[in-house]
């Protein structure tokens, strides 16, 4: 299963994006934060108080993925 498919399947449960003020920006601008990266890589849902989503983290999470 590709990374994007795995993330889509995992979004059925609690995610680090739930209630996050950056959620819509991350989706539309292809951004991700360290909390999201950790969650994708380990499944651990640990949240930091301050999040700084970046394009760099997004690329690390979705490396090798082609745009739809």
Image (spheres, rainbow, N blue to C red):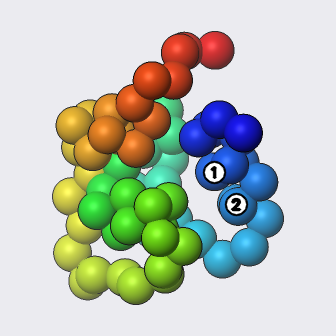
At 27% across and 51% down in the image, what residue appears? Answer: 53
Left/right of residue 67 with respect to residue 34 in the rendered view? right
Q: In which quarter of the image is the N terminus?
A: top right
Q: Furthest residue to the front?
A: 1
* Residue marked by disc 1: 7
In this rendering, does residue 25 appear at all?
Answer: no
Residue 11 — which label?
Answer: 2
Q: Quadrant of residue 10?
A: bottom right
Q: Is mark 2 on a helix, strand or loop?
A: loop
51, above or below 63, in the image: below
At 40% across and 30% down in the image, what residue appears? Answer: 63
Q: 15 or 7, which is in the foreground?
A: 7
Q: Residues within 10 Å of mark 1 (few under 14, many from 20)?
A: some
Q: Quadrant of residue 64?
A: top left
Q: Position of residue 41 (x, y in %)?
A: 45, 61
Q: Position of residue 34 (x, y in %)?
A: 28, 62
Query: What whole-number distance in Å separates the C-alpha atoms at marks 1 and 2?
Result: 6 Å
In this rendering, does residue 67 appear at all?
Answer: yes
At 54% across and 15% down in the image, what residue appears? Answer: 67
Q: Which of marks 1 and 2 is in front?
A: 1
Q: Residues within 10 Å of mark 2 (few under 14, many from 20)?
A: few
At 40% across and 85% down in the image, what residue appears? Answer: 46
Badge 1 vs badge 2, beta-carbon distance below 8 Å: yes
Left/right of residue 57 with respect to residue 46 in the rendered view? left
């Amino acid at each position: 299963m590709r990374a994007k498919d795995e993330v889509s399947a995992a979004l059925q449960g609690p995610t680090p994006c739930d209630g996050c003020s950056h959620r819509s920006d991350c989706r539309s601008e292809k951004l991700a934060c360290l909390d999201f990266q950790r969650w994708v890589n380990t499944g651990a849902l640990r949240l930091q108080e301050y999040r700084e989503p970046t394009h760099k983290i997004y690329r690390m999470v979705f490396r090798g993925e082609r745009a739809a």
